[in-house]
Amino acid sequence: MYKIVVITDPETGDGFRLAGASVIEVKNPDEIEKLIAPVINADDIGIVAVREDYMARLDKAMLSRIERSYHPIIIPIPSPQVGGSMGGYIELLLKRAIGYNIVMRS
């Protein structure tokens, strides 16, 4: 059986552990490049969830490798919004998912 690994910050790591995932806590986001390489090369890992702001720090070669990879499956997870609007963030996620911009009004 494959494992699920979540690469996230120490503040949210415990929640993912409670859900049964293995967690790699990143204290310094600049270290993401060297932390993700061994994870995506492991044979016993099926899904890797990575905070999307950490994914944005990866170089183009690693991002290209991740996009071509079929094992493990690597998915970005939303990172906490700091000073941004949640509505705008949800609109961005919807646009990425369905390919069409939906404007949310309150």
Image (cartoon, grey):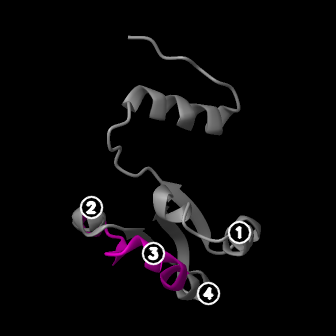
In the rendered image, which quarter is residue 106 located in?
top left
Q: Which residue is mark 2?
A: 12
CA separation in Å, label 4 and label 1: 18 Å
Which residue corresponds to mark 4? 41
Separation (CA) of disc 4 from disc 2: 24 Å
Amino acid type, mark 1: Lys
Report the side of 32 relative to 86 (left or right): right
Q: CA distance from mark 4 to mark 3?
A: 20 Å
Quick one: SS at disc 1?
helix
Assess disc 1: are there few (<14), some (14-19) or many (≥20) residues with their C-alpha within 10 Å of its C-alpha.
few
In the image, what residue occupies the spot 65% across and 71% down?
59
Looking at the rendered structure, the kind of residue marked 4 is Asn
The residue carrying mark 1 is 60
Q: Is residue 73 visible?
A: yes
Local SS, label 4 = helix
Query: At label 2, which amino acid type do we have?
Result: Thr
Proximity of marks 2 and 3: CB atoms separated by less than 8 Å? no
Disc 3 versus disc 1: distance between alpha carbons?
15 Å
Q: Amino acid at mark 3?
A: Asp
